[in-house]
Amino acid sequence: MLSRYFVFILEVKNISGRIDFDDEKRQFTNLKDDNTIEVYTNPEDQVERHIRTIERIMRILNIHLPIVGAIVFSNTSTIIGQKPKRIPAFHLSGLNSHVNYLFNKYSNEVVTFEELTILKDYLLEILKRDNWKPNIDKNKLIKGAICEKCSNQSFMKYHFGRFVCDNCSVLSKDVLLESLLDYRLLFSPWISNNEFKEYFSISSAKTSYKLIKSLNLNFKGNNRSRIYYIPDNILSYKLK
Ligand SMILES: [Zn+2]
């Protein structure tokens, strides 16, 4: 959480059972309801690592806000046993009053709104992750529209404006958009009419072209080389 007064780093944990921080061993244990014990990465170390990262970034940008951290337990059933020594740890219900406490403690505006925006933009920029690329053999994938009603992943055929399941004969229109989203995630956000026709096993090029055209997708290229863009919000498209 960024403000002109301070930066607040929250480590949110959803854990049931009892948790204990061992400051000396830097160990964070969770006694579960079935009496088994599990050890996780110490959230106190995590918060401190994040604080150091933000400190480094602010040094680069020549912005100097105080940085504070907290460990917040979001599961109301968590029993907090031995508390951490350096970073506050509390239940979610205490977050509001903790934030108020921080605004009282850090009551000076340390940076301008412009400086805060620079910090925000910088953080968002380094947050951008590589798009997820599945590491799978694409030839083994079942392509096209797959029936959601059948458990054995039956193929759906396009027939008179709808998809019909080969197995249970259920009809669907929306499966078109869902399958295009699959295509986007598995293959590419761009699809040609020919790829579209093959993906959905539509025998007629004319039918396939009419169907893809009816979606009003953005495209580039003309005629045979035309490719259509499948947006990430394709599921919100309205089908005619
Ligand atoms: Zn079916």
Image: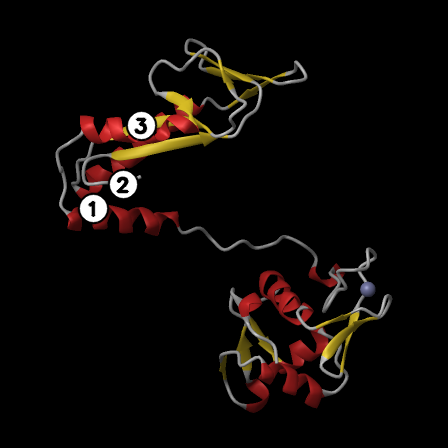
Residue 164 in the image: state x and y as whole percent.
79, 73
The residue type indicated by label 1 comes to Leu
Determine which residue is flagged by label 2: 2
- Left or right of residue 214: residue 111: left
Residue 101 rendering spot, x and y as whole percentages: 25, 26
- Ranked by sequence position, the earlier of labels 2 and 3 is 2
The reply to whether callout 2 and callout 1 are in contact (CB within 8 Å) is: yes
Residue 140 in the figure: left or right of residue 103: right
Whole-Å distance between the Cαs marked 3 and 1?
24 Å
Amino acid type shown at disc 2:
Leu
The quadrant where ligand 1 appears is bottom right
Give the distance between the C-alpha atoms of the residues marked 2 and 1, in whole angstroms: 8 Å
> Which of the two labelled residues, at mark 3 and mark 1, occupies the earlier sequence position?
3
**Residue at the spot x=56%, y=85% of the render?**
225
- Vertical order, 145 against 112 (above or below): below
Q: Say what secondary structure mark 3 lies in.
A: helix
Please tell me whether residue 133 is drawn above or below residue 12 in the rendered image.
below
Residue under pointer 3: 97
Measured in 3D between alpha carbons, the distance from the residue under mark 2 to the one under mark 3, in whole angstroms, is 17 Å
Q: Residue at 57%, 66% (x, y): give it.
A: 235
In the picture, residue 53 is in which quadrant?
top left
Q: Residues within 10 Å of mark 3 (few under 14, many from 20)?
A: few
Label 2 vs 1, first from the N-terminus: 2
Quarter the C terminus occupies: bottom right
Locate residue 27, reporting x and y percent.
Answer: 48, 15
Residue wearing tag 1: 116
State yes or no: Cβ of the residue under disc 2 lies below 8 Å from any atom of ligand 1.
no
Q: Is residue 194 left or right of residue 113?
A: right
Instruction: Determine which of the numbered discs, if any, sits on residue 5 in the image.
Output: none
For the point 75% across and 64% down, the residue is 146
Amino acid at the residue labelled 3: Ser
**Image point (31%, 27%), residue name:** 97
